[in-house]
Amino acid sequence: MLAPCELTAKVVISQLAREAEPPIPPPRGDGHQAARTVPKEPRQPVGKPSATMPPGRILPPLLLALLALGPAAPCSPRPNATRFVCTEPTLSTFPTGLPPTTVAISVEFTALATLLPTALAGLPRLRELHLSSNRLAALPEAVLRPVPTLRVLDLTENLLADLPAGLFSGTTHLQHLVLRGNRLRALRPAWFRHLPRLQWLDVAANALAELPPEVFLPLRSLRSLDLSRNRLASLPPGALAGLRALQRLNLEGNGLGTLPPAAFAPAPALHFLFLQDNALQVLPDGIFVPLRHLRVLDLAHNRLRALELPPWPPGPVLDLDISGNPWACECPLLTLLQRVAPRLSATRDTLCAAPPRHQGQEVAAVSRAGDTSCEPKGDRQRPLDP
């Protein structure tokens, strides 16, 4: 397959070669198209002038220049361009000669394995850097210092097991940071000390086994945090400290077996909370009470038998997925669902495991039918005394 630059050169060469052919005589004026009297000359392969080319057939200077250049280097930068995109699979070194007008760079799906500390020198206006799906295993600590205006950094699907402590010390304007699909085993608090404007942090699909307490404390502007598909077995108290602006938290697909009672208290602005595909057996009493703005709660595919929900706020109905859990369809669960009245998704997979009279039935159907053996007792209900 030809690289884009090489293909462009071949198109130009082909066009110029056609223009170099002798013109066809105009038709006679008798109303009928005259037969061509000039015989066609055999077409020579582009880029291989024949020694038998007739006298007078001189290739244009531009064509000669293109032929002399040979195959073009993949992904050559264009002067005065503002965006540079390269997805050449054979590219192994970061392109050089990018114009200072560049505001966005996308070098993705290549064989890029290293970056020099000076790779981004001379790019004072750079705002977006997309380096996903490469082979980067390490980054120089100084590589981002020439680009203090950077807003977006995407390092998805590389081989990064760690990052230098001071990598982000000069990027105080960074708003989106994506580290998904690498080999990170830990998060360093030093990474986030200089990112007060960060709004989106994605560290999903790494190898994180724990979170340092208060690691996100400097991220006072963060709105979305994705920690899904890691190896987190627990959250330390205060893990979310400082995230008062957080609206979306994804903890899907970890090994969470328990949660601290005040796990979400530091993030009262949460709208979306994803806890599916973990190993949760019990939810602490009142764990969702601080989340008065919650709109989506996903607890699917855990080991829960009893449910906790946030207070019933005015406004949109809570979207709730509790499928794939062994629910005990007894008074506490049934009455809570009647009171909060969430919008249950995946109802066919939301089944009662107990008591025997409800086993295998849909929780939503049992909740709608009610249970005459229950009597209200505050927020929860229990069977009537005999």
Image: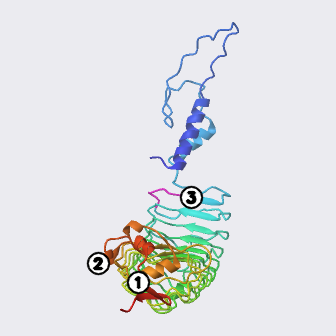
Give coordinates of residue 256: x percent, y percent: 39, 83
Q: Which residue bears the numbered disc 3?
A: 85
* Marks 1,3: beta carbons within 8 A: no
> Would you call the spot at circle 3 few (<14 residues within 10 Å), some (14-19), or many (20 or more)?
some
Q: Which residue bears the numbered disc 2?
A: 356
Quarter of the view holding residue 265: bottom right
Q: Residue furthest front?
A: 386
Give coordinates of residue 380: x percent, y percent: 46, 88
Q: Report the amino acid beneath label 3.
A: Val
Q: Which residue bears the numbered disc 1?
A: 331
In primary-sequence order, the first of circles 2 and 1 is 1
Q: Is label 3 in a helix, a strand or a loop?
A: strand
Identify the residue at image location x=51%, y=46%.
70
Give left or right: position of 281 versus 199.
Answer: left
* In front of the other: 337 or 297: 337
* Marks 2,1: beta carbons within 8 A: no
In primary-sequence order, the first of circles 1 and 3 is 3
Residue range (magenta): 85-91
Q: Report the amino acid beneath label 1.
A: Cys
Q: How many marks?
A: 3
Q: Is residue 163 above or below residue 48?
A: below
* Marks 3,2: beta carbons within 8 A: no
Q: Report the amino acid beneath label 2.
A: Pro
* In front of the other: 382 or 147: 382
Query: Is residue 28 visible in the rendered structure shown here?
Result: yes
* In front of the other: 362 or 58: 362
Q: Main secondary structure of the magenta part?
A: loop
3D distance between C-alphas at marks 3 and 2: 61 Å
